[in-house]
Image (spheres, grey):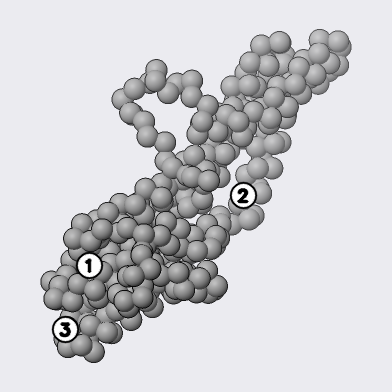
Amino acid sequence: MKAGMINYDPHQWRNHFFDIKGSMVREITGRVLVCVIWSAAVVWAYRNGWHIAVPSTLHSLVGVALGLLLVFRTNASYDRFWEGRKLWGGMVNETRNLIRLAKAHISDDPVLLARLTRWTAAFPYAAMNVLRGTSGLGLAERYLPLERVEAARQVQHPGLFVAQEMTACLRQAYKNGQISDIVLQMLDQNIQLLIDYLGGCERIRKTPLPFAYVIHLRRALIVYCFTLPFALVETYGWTTLLDVFLVTYIFFGIEEIGVEIEGPFGFDDNDLPLEQICGTIQQNVAAIAELDLDPVSIETIESGAL
């Protein structure tokens, strides 16, 4: 199952005005329809002599407070989304820097450089699977030795497993005298930052918005939307249905957008395009190392090149 951010032209209105995919319409349709049907029942009861109308002043005041809560909810979710994107941008930069510096120092050992490049390209795939709760190394498994791929599938944390393989490459280069201890520290710093970025993403994934805040907001939304017809029926009559539809569509839509983007590493339409970022890293490091990341052949594995 692939996820990917929807590409669109922000200058165009008509091209996407009626789009359903990624617009949260499917997610909120049920809630909105229930509110509209309830509104129809309220209007019918009022027009048949039930004295159920209430002053609209209270709903006006509550609506302002509810709007502020929704704004905070959306801002908090977008902060998480944008922080996740920055962390993955850091992964892109650090993988480039790692292979760039490694090539400058161990280019005389193409086998070791190729090994380091393959494991570096595998790190974002491992990170993606960690964040999504899946196993393995994704597309990176095509160009890694089978026994190491199987080992990565069995470990508790594939991201750390790949980082250890990268460190092993650096340790081998240091042992061979290809890099000094200072260069080793510089290269290892890139790996440390990759682990830090992954840890930051795990923090976002494992720390949802406070339960009390989310529950209180949803309760307030339900109470407000289901009591709104009582404040409108006396003034608007059957037009209350349209008014409730507009209000609930906007309010439930804003809340659902917050839900969609607060966890940006999954498969939702508005989540980060992690597969695309992983592919970019793979292409970048392969280009820097001048290496074709093709599926590993049996001859390559048996020769000890990996």
In what element is the residue under mark 1? Answer: helix
At 24% from the left edge and 74% from the top edge, which residue is drawn? 111
- Number of residues whose C-alpha sits closer than 10 Å to that of mark 2, classed few (under 14), some (14–19) or many (20 or more): some
Q: Position of residue 151 (x, y in %)?
A: 50, 74
Residue at image location 49% in from the left, 60% down from the top: 129
Choose mark 2 or mark 1, whichever is in front: 1
Taking 43 as reference, is 82 left or right?
left
Find numbered disc 2 in the image and state the secondary structure of the residue it sits on. Answer: helix
The residue at the far right in this view is 49
Of circles 2 and 3, the one toward us is 3
Viewer-closest of 301 and 4: 301
Q: Residue at x 21, y 77 (%)?
A: 186
Residue identifier under label 2? 214
Q: Earlier in the sequence, mark 3 or mark 1?
A: 1
Real-space CA distance between mark 2 and mark 3, rounded to the nearest whole angstrom = 55 Å
Identify the disc placed on residue 260. Answer: none
| Residue nearer the viewer, 148 or 66 | 148
Vertical placement of residue 133 versus 26, above or below: below
On-image quarter of the C terminus = bottom left
Q: Which residue is mark 3?
A: 178
Inspect the image, locate mark 3, and give the three-letter code of the amino acid beneath it. Answer: Gln
Q: Residue at left 62%, top 44%?
A: 217
Q: Which residue is mark 1?
A: 99
- The answer to which of 98 and 177 lies nearer the viewer is 177
Query: Looking at numbered disc 1 in the image, what kind of residue is underneath it?
Result: Ile
Which amino acid, by three-letter code, is at mark 2? Val
Query: For residue 44, which quarter of the picture?
Result: top right
Q: Is residue 225 left or right of residue 259?
A: right
